[in-house]
Image (cartoon, grey):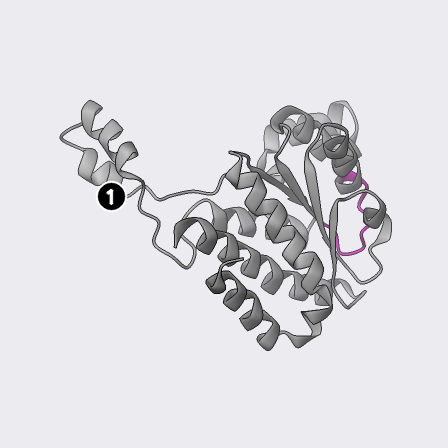
Amino acid sequence: MKTGVIDILDDMFIRNPDLCTCKNSIEKAFSMMKRCYENGGKLLICGNGGSAADSEHIVGELMKGFLLKRKICSGDTKKIKILFPEDYEYLAGNLQGTLPAISLVSQSAISTAYINDVAADMVFAQQVYGYAKTGDVLIGLSTSGNSKNVIHAMKVAKAFGVGSIGLTGEDGGMMKGVCDCIICVPSKITPEVQEYHLPIYHALCAMIEYEFFK
């Protein structure tokens, strides 16, 4: 890891010393995300309730500048200028470099249709099957580690060569047996688990942003 990436992680542990027990799994998650983006992949993210909100939050940090400015490359600017010479400065000036990510909780039409017509606990799995390709990574958040719709999505991910990262509570639940990397924070109390998840995914987003845009 780059020195700046290590600094981001170390700072997170200084502010959240209880999370030092998660160091190895956080570093593994970062490596999986880095490899995914290096190979032109994307992240898919899912969870329920507060974890659904976290899914949206993560996408917001990845798809635009988070802590760094992300100018688009000169080649992309030229493509816009060729087609729209009068507007390219505005268009290119207001686009930002991106780390592709999709929140599976946002897809209301397919989600409600699948819940109503097929099986509610397969709503994320269907989207993984439809969106993902080999080399992508699924991030699933579940405070208990036992959310069936997240577990099913991880099983489908594994079947089709999609990596999986789980963020959960201290015992891991069923998630521990199906995902490639599990980050178990030191609590079983739902709101505390969610509070621990926030600095972890903020650090991961900042680390991956630094890796690709610094």
Identified by mark 1, the residue type is Gly
Q: Is residue 67 left or right of residue 179?
A: left
Would residue 143 be found to the left or right of residue 85 on screen? right
- Residue 52 left/right relative to 149: left
Q: Residues within 10 Å of mark 1 (few under 14, many from 20)?
A: few
Q: At which x and y percent is residue 79?
A: 26, 27
**Residue 196 shown in magenta:** no
Q: Main secondary structure of the magenta part?
A: loop
Q: In this rendering, does residue 7 appear at all?
A: yes
Residue at horizontal 64 percent and vertical 29 percent from the top: 134
Pinpoint residue 25: horizontal percent, then vertical percent.
70, 57
User: Is residue 189 positioned above or below 81 on the image?
Assistant: below
Residue 102 can be seen, yes or no: no
| Residue at the left extreme of this rendering | 86
- Of residues 119 and 60, the one nearer the viewer is 60
Residue at 68% over, 64% down: 23
What residue is shown with label 1?
Answer: 93
Q: x%, y% of residue 209?
A: 46, 52
Q: Is residue 209 left or right of residue 165?
A: left
Asked if 140 appears above or below 158 in the picture, the reply is: below
From which residue to which does the magenta span run?
Answer: 141-149
Residue 170 percent location from the top left of the image:
81, 63
Figure quadrant of the C terminus: bottom left
Where is the N terminus found, in terms of image quarters?
A: bottom right
Identify the secondary structure beneath mark 1.
Answer: helix
Residue found 52% across the figure and 40% down from its top: 37
Count every numbered label the image shows and give the total: 1
Q: Is residue 146 magenta?
A: yes
